[in-house]
Each structure stands twice: as structure tokens, then as C-alpha cells.
């Protein structure tokens, strides 16, 4: 029997018991469907993060904090109070259970004096009360605290600059509410930000709109240049008691954007030796991608469990087939068909079942996933331009189908061996 004859016969034999084969194919279908969808989720979100990092991520900024200390063991009771310990904007430090210390002015000086660092600024928390344009109504405002780490994905205008003038970037979703009109028309207009001081008195600070930004995962809310940040922070802390040295949880530091990986690593190592942890945006995105990979791996595990169940279904299907076709196997061997070809016949049958279930599962996943992804992109994720939650990479889909076929082949080993070892005389006598 030639190779093509073996394949044709195996395909025909697959449909001898339609119900049994269908149930086995359904089990494989579920596993392949799950694996294809979860892999697509991982690909879609990872690609979006990579694109965002490439398009809006800055390459010359480090986010710096005090190196994390071991949190106190609650079983050992509270630590002794230290009144000299700095706090960040009145927030308790590690002794109250936080695992990260605060940066003081002396820390900022030390960071600024580190070789390779061009400048350093504390990342402050601003709680503005409202934003307003041309007395058309006051509205709540959210301020992005990571503006230094990312570039805005601009719909119009320009990026913030280190100017002495107050500059602000507005999300596109703010324009209609504030009455600023279209994105291009908003450029150059002046908005007012209201912020309360320590005693509750309201201060108003004016800023010029230099750009309008699209919403991204890496930043939401309005963005401020350093001059505007400093003025708002001064207004917010006006009247605040100065009984303690002010501290900050984070600082942003610029380095030479032409620095290579080794030079950046040297800066990080220098800061680490001084007790500071420094990360680029790429480092932080890497943490998210690691978490995402872990979640996708867990989801893939459920698909593999379904495939494991399907493997036992293949074993059962082929064992029943061997038993039902005992006389047929004996006749083939009596006519000169070797054990190797009998083995190949049942193996190809299993591989075909695996291919059938996995191909149908993958196609169904691609169809359902494409519909779901498009619906999400046009509804709840419409503001995140370019995000396709599910992306189906041809290589991954082919890999899943190949994996299922390998599992099916391995599952066929026991039934195929049993068929190949049949004694033709005893098989022909089988009733």
C-alpha cells in the first residue's frame, strides 16, 4: 500500500463511526479554540504595548525611587516611631507599612550629581479642583503624573517643551466639554486651572494649550510642562506647615538620549549603589508584559487540559477501531501488508482527527475573535486608537494546529502498536 493509499484509507476510516469521531473532534475543537483565542489576546496586547512604547515612549528619562526596603513583619508588632523620618506630602513612610522610602531634597541633589544625569525633578501629586475655558463652565480635571516618561500621541499641536511659559496638553475628549472646538482650533487658547491651597483657598493658574492628545494606555489626563507643574504645586502647598522636610515618592531624571544600553545600565548601577532604583519606561512596560505572559500562560493551561482530555478520546476511538477491524487488519497482513504500514495507517488516522479538530477550532476562534475585537475597538476601547485586543498571527495559529497533530500522533501510539502486532491468523479467526 502506497503512502497516498494509506492517507486515503485513513481518512475514509475516520468517518466509519461518525458519532465517535465527532465527539473526539469536538474535544479537540474546544482545546484548539481556547489556545487560539488566548494566544491572540497575548499577541494583541503585547503588540499594542510595543507600538505605544515605540511611538510615545521617551528614551532619555529614568523614573527613580528609593530602593524598596523589607516591609515590617506584622507578626513582630509595629516598629518604633521615628519623628525624623521624612514623609511624602504628609503620607507616612515605610514604618507605617510602605515598602518604599521617600526622596528628600538631598536625595534629588545626589541624583542630579550622578554621572550621566542631566537634570532631575521630583514627581509631585497635584489635585486640581477644576479646569475652565473662557468662563464656559468649570469641569473636573485629571492630571497625568507620568508626562515626563512618555510623549503624547498628538492629534494636533506640539509636544511640551521646557519653556518658562505654562504649557498644557489636553486629551481630545476634553475639547467639546470645555467648548474649545476642534483640535486644531484649540491650539494657542488659554485655559484656567483651579487648585486649592492647604487652607482651602482657591488659586487660579493660566496655561496655554500647545497640543491635543489621543488617549493611550501609557497616559491619561492632561499633561503639564515643568513650569506649570511648579506653579500649581506652589499654589497647592501654600500655607502648608513646614515642620518636616518635604519628601517625594518618585523623581524623573533625564540622561543623554544617545546613550547606549551599556551606558544606561552604568547609570542605573551607579544610582543603585547610592540606594536608588531607576527604571526606564521600557523596564516598566516589561513588568506589564511579564504579568500578561503569566495570565496568558494560565489561560493556555485550560486549553491544554481540554487537549489532554481529547488525547484520551483519540486513544479510546482508535482502540475501539482496532477491535472492530481486527479481521480487516488480519486480512491486510495476510496479503503482505507489513506491521509498519499498519502502524502508519492508524497513526495517520489519529493525525487527521487532530488536524480536523484543531483547524476547525482555530478557524472558529479567528472568526469569533475578529468580531469581538472589532466590536470592542468600536465601543469600549474606541479611545485607545490602534488597540486590537485579539490579533491572530499566522505562525502562532499554524503552531497550535501542529501541536495538536503531534499530541494526536502520540495518543495513537498505543492503538497503532496493538494493530501492528496483530497475528494475522488469530485476527482472521476473530469474531
Image (cartoon, grey):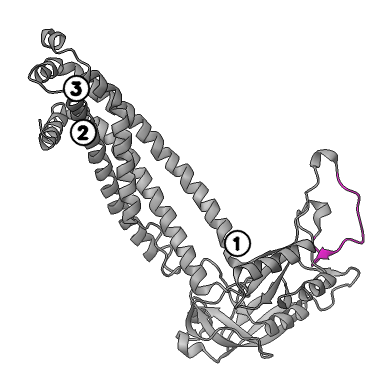
Q: Quadrant of residue 228?
A: bottom right
Q: Position of residue 118 (x, y in %)?
A: 71, 79
Residue 326 is one of the magenta-drawn residues: no
Number of other residues with Cα within 10 Å of mark 1, as a class: few under 14, some 14 to 19, many 20 or more: few
Percent position of residue 261, x then y: 60, 68
Q: Are marks 2 and 1 in contact (CB under 8 Å)?
A: no
Judged left or right of residue 270, residue 39 is left
Give the tally of numbered discs: 3
Label 2 or label 3, whichever comes before in sequence order: 3
Which mark lies nearer to you, 1 or 3? Answer: 3
Task: Pick the quarter of the image with the N terminus.
Answer: top left
**What is the chief secondary structure element of the magenta stretch?**
loop
- Can residue 126 be seen? no
The C terminus - image quarter: top left
Give, as a single range, the part of the protein colored magenta.
78-91
Residue 265: image location, x then y, percent: 66, 65
* Disc number placed over residue 239 in the picture, else none: none
Is residue 86 magenta-colored?
Answer: yes
Q: Nearer the viewer, mark 2 or mark 1?
A: 2
- Which numbered circle lies on residue 348? 2
Say which label, 1 or 3, has the lower sequence index: 1
Q: CA distance from mark 2 to mark 3?
A: 14 Å
Amino acid at each position: 500500500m502506497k503512502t497516498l493509499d494509506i492517507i486515503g484509507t485513513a481518512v475514509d476510516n475516520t468517518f466509519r463511526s461518525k458519532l465517535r469521531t465527532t465527539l473526539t473532534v469536538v474535544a479537540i475543537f474546544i482545546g484548539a479554540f481556547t489556545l487560539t483565542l488566548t494566544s491572540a489576546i497575548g499577541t494583541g496586547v503585547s503588540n499594542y504595548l510595543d507600538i505605544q512604547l515605540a511611538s510615545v515612549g521617551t528614551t532619555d528619562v529614568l523614573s527613580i525611587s528609593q530602593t524598596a526596603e523589607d516591609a515590617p513583619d506584622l507578626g513582630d508588632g509595629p516598629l518604633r516611631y521615628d519623628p525624623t523620618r521624612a514623609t511624602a506630602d504628609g503620607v507616612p513612610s515605610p514604618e507605617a507599612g510602605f515598602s518604599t522610602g521617600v526622596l528628600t531634597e538631598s536625595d534629588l541633589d545626589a541624583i542630579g550629581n550622578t554621572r550621566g544625569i542631566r537634570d532631575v525633578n521630583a514627581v509631585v501629586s497635584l489635585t486640581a479642583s477644576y479646569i475652565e475655558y473662557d468662563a464656559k463652565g468649570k469641569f473636573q480635571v485629571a492630571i497625568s503624573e507620568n508626562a515626563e516618561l512618555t510623549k503624547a500621541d498628538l492629534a494636533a499641536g506640539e509636544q511640551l517643551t521646557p519653556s518658562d511659559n505654562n504649557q498644557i496638553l489636553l486629551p481630545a475628549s476634553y475639547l467639546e466639554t470645555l467648548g474649545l472646538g476642534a483640535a486644531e482650533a484649540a491650539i494657542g487658547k488659554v485655559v484656567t486651572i483651579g487648585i486649592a491651597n492647604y487652607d482651602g483657598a482657591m488659586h487660579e493658574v493660566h496655561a496655554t494649550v500647545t497640543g491635543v492628545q489621543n488617549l493611550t494606555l501609557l497616559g491619561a489626563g492632561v499633561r503639564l510642562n515643568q513650569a506649570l507643574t511648579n506653579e500649581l504645586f506652589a499654589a497647592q502647598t501654600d500655607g502648608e506647615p513646614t515642620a518636616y522636610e518635604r519628601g517625594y515618592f518618585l523623581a524623573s531624571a533625564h540622561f543623554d538620549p544617545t546613550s547606549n544600553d551599556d551606558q544606561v545600565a552604568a547609570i542605573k548601577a551607579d544610582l543603585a549603589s547610592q540606594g536608588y532604583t531607576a527604571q526606564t519606561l521600557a523596564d516598566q512596560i516589561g513588568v506589564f508584559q511579564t504579568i500578561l505572559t503569566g495570565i496568558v500562560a494560565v489561560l493556555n493551561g485550560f486549553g491544554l487540559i481540554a487537549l489532554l482530555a481529547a488525547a484520551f478520546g483519540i486513544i479510546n476511538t482508535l482502540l475501539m477501531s482496532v477491535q472492530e477491524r481486527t479481521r480487516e487488519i488480519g486480512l491486510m497482513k495476510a496479503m503482505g501488508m507489513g506491521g509498519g504500514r499498519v502502524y502508519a495507517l492508524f497513526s495517520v488516522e489519529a493525525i487527521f482527527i487532530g488536524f480536523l479538530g484543531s483547524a476547525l477550532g482555530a478557524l472558529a476562534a479567528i472568526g469569533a475573535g475578529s468580531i469581538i475585537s472589532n466590536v470592542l475597538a468600536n465601543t469600549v476601547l474606541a479611545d485607545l486608537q490602534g488597540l486590537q485586543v485579539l490579533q491572530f498571527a499566522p505562525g502562532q495559529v499554524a503552531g497550535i494546529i501542529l501541536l495538536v497533530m503531534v499530541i494526536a500522533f502520540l495518543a495513537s501510539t498505543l492503538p497503532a502498536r496493538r494493530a501492528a502486532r496483530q497475528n494475522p491468523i488469530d485476527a482472521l479467526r476473530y469474531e
